[in-house]
């Protein structure tokens, strides 16, 4: 058993700010001796419960315009590539199912980062099974059996349950970081969440 503090990283593949968070969470947490638990979930059902049928960045144009410029600044500061997707938000359901099914695999974080890069740096359709299969192959994995497990009724239901858990835990957006019962929302709260985990 280990007493190493843990941080839960809750992410949604359609979420813009989850992209830079996913690219740096392991480095920031690791430097402080904090482990990361990767938690994919779906924002769609949570947004629907709030009365939204689309991303708030599309519903409120001024907010969206600010977000895209801010993403350019954030990614430039972090030295990660960024290209505004031609479709937003992209459907991340398949990627989330794969990520959930493989959450315990050592290559899973690298797969998650590759999906984000495909969407927000290469403008690829991450809802396409061929794209996700190629990203799995890029991690040295055979895509077909993983995709089969990811699309199984059991895995689909388990991801739904994780999304319900997120809602019950008070999550309303992504990225979110949970330390014990403390919730931190947003890429810019990562350092604060890590610091809290080390208390």
Image: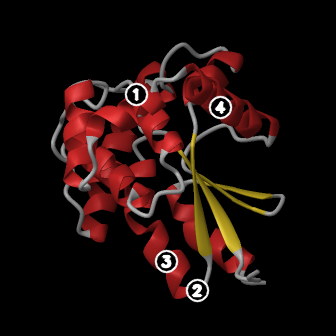
Please name the residue that numbered disc 4 is placed on: 158
Residue 52 figure quarter:
top right
Crowding at mark 2 (Cα within 10 Å: few <14, some 14-19, many 20+) = some
Quadrant of the drawing holding the N terminus: bottom right
Residue 111 located left or right of residue 199: left
Q: Is residue 57 visible?
A: no
Of the image marks 4 and 2, the number of the one nearer the N terminus: 2
- Please state which of residues 21 and 153 is positioned toward the viewer in this rendering: 153
The CA distance from mark 2 to mark 3 is 7 Å
Name the N-terminal-most of marks 3 and 1: 3
Say which residue label 3 marks. 28
* Separation of residues labelled 3 and 4 (CA atoms): 29 Å
Residue under label 1, please give it. Answer: 148
Q: Quadrant of residue 43?
A: top right
The foreground one among 93 and 23 is 93
Q: Is residue 1 left or right of residue 37?
A: right
Which residue is painted at 25% across and 24% down in the image? 128
Can you identify the residue that label 2 sits on? 32
84 left or right of 34?
left
Q: CA distance from mark 1 to mark 2?
A: 37 Å
Label 3: element kind: helix
Q: Which SS class for mark 2?
A: loop
Q: CA distance from mark 4 to mark 1?
A: 15 Å
Q: Which element carries disc 4, helix, strand or loop?
A: helix
Looking at marks 1 and 2 on the same chain, the residue that comes earlier in the sequence is marked by 2
């Amino acid at each position: 058993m280990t007493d190493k503090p843990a941080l839960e990283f809750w992410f949604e593949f359609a979420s813009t700010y989850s992209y830079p968070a996913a690219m740096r969470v392991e480095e920031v947490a690791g430097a402080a001796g904090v482990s990361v638990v990767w938690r994919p979930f779906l924002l769609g059902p949570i947004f629907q419960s709030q009365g939204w049928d689309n991303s708030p960045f599309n519903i409120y144009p001024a907010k969206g315009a600010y977000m895209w410029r801010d993403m350019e600044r954030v990614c430039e500061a972090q030295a990660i590539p960024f290209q505004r997707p031609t479709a937003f938000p992209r459907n991340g359901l398949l990627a989330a199912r794969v990520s959930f099914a493989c959450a315990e695999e050592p290559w899973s974080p690298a797969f998650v980062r590759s999906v984000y890069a495909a969407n927000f740096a290469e403008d690829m359709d991450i809802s396409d099974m061929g794209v996700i299969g190629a990203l799995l192959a890029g991690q040295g994995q055979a895509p077909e059996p993983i995709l089969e497990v990811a699309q199984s009724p059991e895995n689909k239901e388990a991801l739904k349950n994780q999304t319900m858990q997120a809602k019950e835990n008070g999550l309303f957006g992504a990225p979110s970081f949970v330390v014990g019962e403390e919730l931190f929302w947003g890429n810019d709260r990562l350092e604060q969440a890590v610091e809290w985990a080390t208390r």
